[in-house]
Amino acid sequence: MSGRIFSGVQPTGALHLGNYLGAIRHWVHLQQDYEAIYCVVDQHAITLPQDPNELRGAIREVAAALIACGIDPDRSILFNQSTVPAHAQLAWVLMCQTPIGWLNRMTQFKEKAGKQRDNASAGLYTYPVLMSADILAYNATHVPVGEDQKQHLELARDTAGAFNRQFGVEFFVLPEPMILGEATRVMSLRDGTKKMSKSDTSDYSRINLTDDADTIAQKIRKAKSDPIEGMSYDVAGRPEASNLLTIYAALADLPRSQVEAEFASANFSAFKGRLADLCVEKLSPITTEMRRLLADPAEIDRILDRGAEKADAIAGPILRQVYDIVGFRQA
Ligand code: ATP
Ligand code: LTN
C-alpha cells in the first residue's frame, strides 16, 4: 500500500458526470494501491438548507452510486460522515487553529453565499475546517478531488502545519492533493464557463448518473453549441466545444488531442450523436446497478454501518491523541 486516501462527496442530489469523471472513477482505480476511505459528507450538506427526507434519501442514493461505479465496500471504507463523531470533534479543535483571514480567502464561500453574505450560515463559512478535519482525522496522505477543491486542500495542509507548530509536534501528515485525468473541471452543458454542479437549478446543465438513455441523448442534443465549423479545442474561444471534447476523451480514455483530430471536420450535431452514444454506453451499466442496489435500502444501511465502525476504529484513537496533545483531560 502506498498511503491512505480520504475523499468525500456531498449528498445534495444525484451524482453527475463531473463528479464521475473528475473524482469517482479515479477513486475506483486508487483502491488497488491505497488504503481508501470514502465518505458521504452529510454534515457538509447541511451548510445549505436541506429537506430532511430528501437528505435521508440522497445519502443512500450517493452510497449506491459509489458502489455502482466500482467502490468495493469490502476493500475500502464507505460510510456517512455524521455516524463517526471524530469529524465534528476534530473540526472544533482545528477551528481554534484557523485564522479567520484564511477563511476569508475561500472563493467557494463567496460563490455559494452570493450577495446574502450576512445571512449565510457560520457552517458554510467554516466548512473548509470541517473538510480539514475529515482528512486529518485519518492522517490521510492523499486526497483525490476535482479542481474546485484545490483551495480547500491547501487550507487543510496549512491547518495541519499550524497545529504541528503550535504544539511543537510532528503529528499531522500534510495531505497531498491528487487532481487526476483530463476532466478535472467538467463544465455545465448550458454554459461552458460554469462548473457542472449538483446545485445548478437547470437539470439540463448536467448529466446525472440516474438519467436514462433517452434523457442523456436529449440533454447532449440540447447542449449549447457554437456556429464554428468542425470541432476544436479552444477553451477561451469555444468553451462548449472544448468541454464536450474533454468529456468524450475522458469517457473514451483517449488523449484529448486524438479526439480533437478525429472530429476536426465533424459538425457539432454529428459529434453530439457520437458523444451521446458513448455516454450511454459508459453510464448505463452504472445506472442499472444503482437501481438494483437501491431496491434494498437495508443492505445499503448495513454497508454504511460497517464502514462507520471501521472508520471510527481509525479516527477515534487519532482524536484521543489530539485531545491529549491539546491538554484536555479525558474520562
Ligand atoms: P455542488 O456543486 O452542488 O457543490 P458538486 O457537484 O461540486 O456539488 P461535490 O460533492 O461537492 O459535488 O463533489 C464531489 C467530487 O466531485 C469532488 O471531488 C469535486 O471536486 C468533484 N467535482 C464536482 N464537480 C465537478 C466538475 N464539474 N468537474 C470535475 N470534478 C467535479
Ligand atoms: N468539499 C468537498 C467534499 C468533501 C471532501 C472532504 C473532499 C468534504 N470533505 C474531504 C475531500 C476530502 C466538495 O464539496 N466536493
Image (cartoon, rainbow, N blue to C red):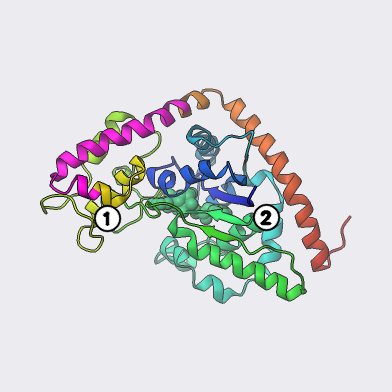
Q: Residue at x 19, y 41 (%)?
A: 271
Q: Confirm whether the magenta stretch covers residue 284.
A: yes
| Residue 211 in view, yes or no | no
Q: Are there few (<14), some (14-19), or many (20+) residues within 10 Å of tag 1?
A: many
Q: Position of residue 297 (x, y in %)?
A: 57, 27
Q: Residue at x 47, y 27 (%)?
A: 289
Q: Quadrant of residue 286?
A: top left
Q: Position of residue 280 (x, y in %)?
A: 32, 32
Q: Are there few (<14), some (14-19), or many (20+) residues within 10 Å of tag 2?
A: some
Residue stretch rendered in magenta on the structure: 260-289
Q: Position of residue 231 (x, y in %)?
A: 17, 50
Residue pointed to by mark 2: 88
Q: Which quadrant holds the C terminus? A: bottom right
Mark-to-mark CA distance, 2 and 1: 36 Å
Drawn side of residue 32 relative to residue 84, left or right: left
Q: Nearer the viewer, residue 273 or 128?
A: 273
Q: Nearer the viewer, mark 2 or mark 1?
A: 1
Residue 314 position (above or below residue 215) = below
Drawn side of residue 299 relative to residue 278, left or right: right
Q: Nearer the viewer, residue 64 or 266?
A: 266
Any atom of ligand 1 within 8 Å of the CB at mark 1? no
Badge 1 marks a residue whose secondary structure is loop
Q: Are marks 2 and 1 in contact (CB under 8 Å)?
A: no
Any atom of ligand 2 within 8 Å of the CB at mark 2? no
User: Callout 2, which amino acid?
Assistant: Ala
Mark 2 vs 1, N-terminal side: 2
Residue pointed to by mark 1: 192
Drawn side of residue 242 relative to residue 87, left or right: left
User: Callout 1, which amino acid?
Assistant: Gly
